[in-house]
Amino acid sequence: MINRIGLIFDFDETLAADSTSCFLESLGLDVQKFWENEVNPLYQKQGWDPIPAYLYKMIEFSQSSIKTRITQKNLAEFGKKIKFFNGVQNIFRQIEQRAKEVNPTIQVDFFLISSGIREILMNTKITKYFKDIWACDFEYNSKGEIVFPKNIVSFTDKTRYLFQISKGIFGPESRLNPFEVNKKVSQLYIPFNQMIVVGDGYTDIPLFSLITKNGGKAIAVYNPEDKRKWPKAWGFVEDKRVSNLVPADYGIKHALNHTLMMVVQNIAEKLLVDNTVYQR
């Protein structure tokens, strides 16, 4: 039996505020106008996918800006300044501890799948907890400036990485062979029914659907202070895409923390029983 749990997080509005918007705001950009006047018309009127649309507009802004270019360096530096939702920086150790209390031999692997900017996410204070991070990448010129999208992680693109996790295909070398995800494996690294997905938005719906259909757990989070997004969050429940819907507060006394602990404990207990039976 595979004595391993996979916990997959989205980033923006799941673990922290929208990192791309916060970064652009730090450059002095009017973020609301950027999304509403620049990005949204590309997919609402011209048929763009929303993710390459925002990447393209970032490149356009960078190349037209007299004062500020968007570079690999300032993306990375901003990542170090990211502020997380309450309890985020402690949740990883807490989950590992709870799993070990139930099943001492179990392993919990954390992964991040995001439509945000990987250079930002690779430099946050919680990066060390993740086995791998998949997000949008830029190609940079000799000055380190963004010039073209290198990798795009949009809606169903996210499900690809669930398959990679299930087959144990992650880490730097996996990026040199993108076709490896299609290979058959004799044994899964983590089955879908031992995975938990935590996300907040429309780009997470394919993840929610794939996980729930295959016996895993999908948890949707929302910002309780942003009532504009409540209908979207409730829609996940109405459409039966998620197991739970809770505020994005990971504090030890809050519902999300309790939900994660209960789900991890439940899977760990089942694996303990299954392994005991298997060994007999």
Image (tube, rainbow, N blue to C red):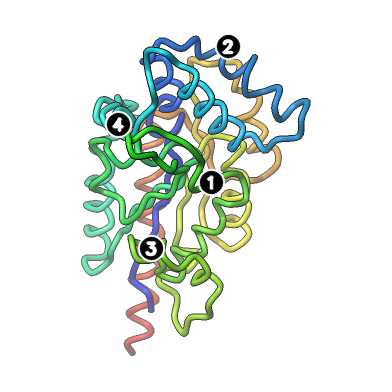
Q: Secondary structure at mark 2?
A: helix
The mark nearer the N terminus, 3 or 4, is: 4
Please report contact status of discs 4 and 2: CB closer than 8 Å, yes or no. no
Label 2 and label 3: CA atoms lie apart by 37 Å
According to the picture, the residue beneath numbered tag 2 turns out to be 33
Q: Quadrant of the N terminus?
A: bottom left
Name the foreground residue: 27 vs 183: 27
Q: CA distance from mark 1 to mark 3?
A: 15 Å
Looking at the rendered structure, the kind of residue marked 3 is Phe
Residue drawn at the location 40% of the way across and 69% of the way down? 168
* Amino acid type for the residue under numbered disc 4: Gly
- Image coords of residue 131 (percent x, y): 31, 56
Q: Which residue is mark 4?
A: 79
Q: What numbered label is drawn on residue 170? A: 3
Residue under circle 1? 153
Instruction: Determine crowd level at label 3: few under 14, some 14-19, many 20+ residues with C-alpha closer than 10 A.
Output: some
Kind of residue sitting beneath label 2? Lys
Identify which amino acid the numbered label 1 is placed on. Val
> Which residue appears farthest toward the front when viewing the image?
142
Which numbered disc, 1 or 3, marks the residue that appears first in the sequence?
1
* Residue at 51% across, 69% down: 181
Depth-wise, is mark 2 or mark 3 nearer the camera? 2
The tag earlier along the polypeptide, 4 or 1, is 4
Judged from the image, the secondary structure of the residue bearing numbered disc 1 is: loop
Mark 2 or mark 1, which is nearer the start of the sequence? 2
